[in-house]
Image: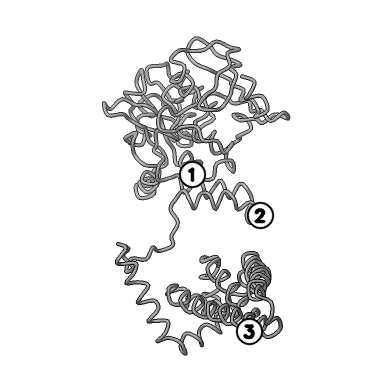
Amino acid sequence: MLVLSAFFSGSETSLMTLNRYRLRHLVKLKHSGAIKAHKLLQRPDRVLGLILLCNNFVNNFASSIATVIAIKLYADEESSVAIAAAILTLVMLIFSEVTPKTLATIKPELLAFPSAWVYTVLLKIFYPLVWLVNSLAHCLLRWMGVDTTKTSQESLNKDELKSIISEAESVMPSRYQKMLLGILDLESATVEDVMTPRNEIVGIDLELPIETIILQIKHSAHTRLPVYKQNVDRVVGFLHLRKALIEIHHEDFDKQTIISLLNKPTFIPESTPVHTQMLRFKTEKVRFGLVVDEYGDVQGLVTLDDLLQEIVGELITEEENTVRQQHDGSYLVDASVTVRELNRITQWMLPTEGPKTLNGLILDFMETIPNSGICIRLHGYALEILKSDENSVKLVKFLPHSKENRL
């Protein structure tokens, strides 16, 4: 009876602690034990009813046997039954409960798959009794106001899936973890989060002399540039520099030639989700666009590379130039880095709903432009302002955990 009790206790724990996603994977691989276990767990009330029915029977039977043995051996002792019950409780606790359940928790598949074959047979034999027990239990639950017809489907929400990916260090490299986390964040990210801000847009001003424009075309680090008159709000189009370089050596090359080479500009509302804009870039066969606010003013520029960067991150960007970890655990951070990128690199939880850059987050928090040398605790993270000018914060040092408590 003790051995049977250990089997029922351990198998119950192993079946209930099986990883459901690994179980589904094994079912797809045609694992016979997994198929049986998965079928049983489709109706967990039935298998639990069967296990508890069998377990209680063998436990009570063991108790009855122990009582009979105590009376037979020590009939003259009044406390013999109590001593036998105490000894049986201790033995059953160690050998029939704690030990098998601990083993089942550590290696659930070791007990779950063989026991699934046994329970499949037992369920057919004792089905009428199991059905009666479950029916009475369901009636009691309904009397208590619990709807037994609604069973929760085991599924993961986005935050739970992100937690699983973050903890999968032994399964995949960290760079792939960041890629998957970036994909999961696409739904909440907008083009405003990833765009190049207006003050950093490099373009061609048609009001400049043609000689200056030619030099800019020859020495530009970009392959495509917006072309505008006086300011980027008056954009005319986008120039592919490869086309311009072919024409630039012709004697009749002038501003009109540049205008004839322009592609029509694309304007993107700043609240457009990243995944939506990626689809538009694909369908419209363009790679860049100007981000505008509700008044039609240009706020920045976004390219297909910027959107892909939101997914692949460090594979195509030099993160060490903006976020550099020091030997003491501190971080030197360029304040122009976006909050989302900083969170991705450091696994921090700085808020992303408001300002989009670290500089904006600091200015919003302090409501002034801080001087160099000032230390603050920004949303729980201690930092020191290393460089700033009249307009913005330039360089920040995030202090390591060991120093945060000193502020």
Q: Nearer the viewer, residue 3 or 244?
A: 3
Question: Which label sits on residue 308?
Answer: 1
Q: What residue is drawn where x is 62% and y is 22%?
A: 397
**Quadrant location, the N terminus:** bottom right
**Quadrant location, the C terminus:** top right
Q: Which amino acid, by three-letter code, is at mark 2?
A: Ser
Q: Secondary structure at mark 1?
A: helix
Q: Which amino acid, by three-letter code, is at mark 3?
A: Val
The alpha-carbon separation of the residues under discs 3 and 1 comes to 76 Å
Question: Which label sits on residue 134?
Answer: none
Q: What residue is drawn where x is 69% and y is 30%?
A: 329
Q: Which residue is mark 2?
A: 170
What colour scheme was applied to this rendering of the protein? one colour
Q: Nearer the viewer, residue 212 or 223?
A: 223
Q: Secondary structure at mark 2?
A: loop
71 w.r.t. 155: above or below = below
Q: Which amino acid, by three-letter code, is at mark 1?
A: Leu
Which of the marked residues, 1 or 2, is nearer the chain's N terminus? 2
Give the mark toward the camera: 1 or 2. 2
Label 3 Cα neighbours within 10 Å, binned few <14 / some 14-19 / many ≥20? some
Give the mark toward the camera: 3 or 2. 3
Q: Which residue is mark 3?
A: 68
Horizontal arrangement in the rendering, residue 402 relative to residue 352 (left or right): right
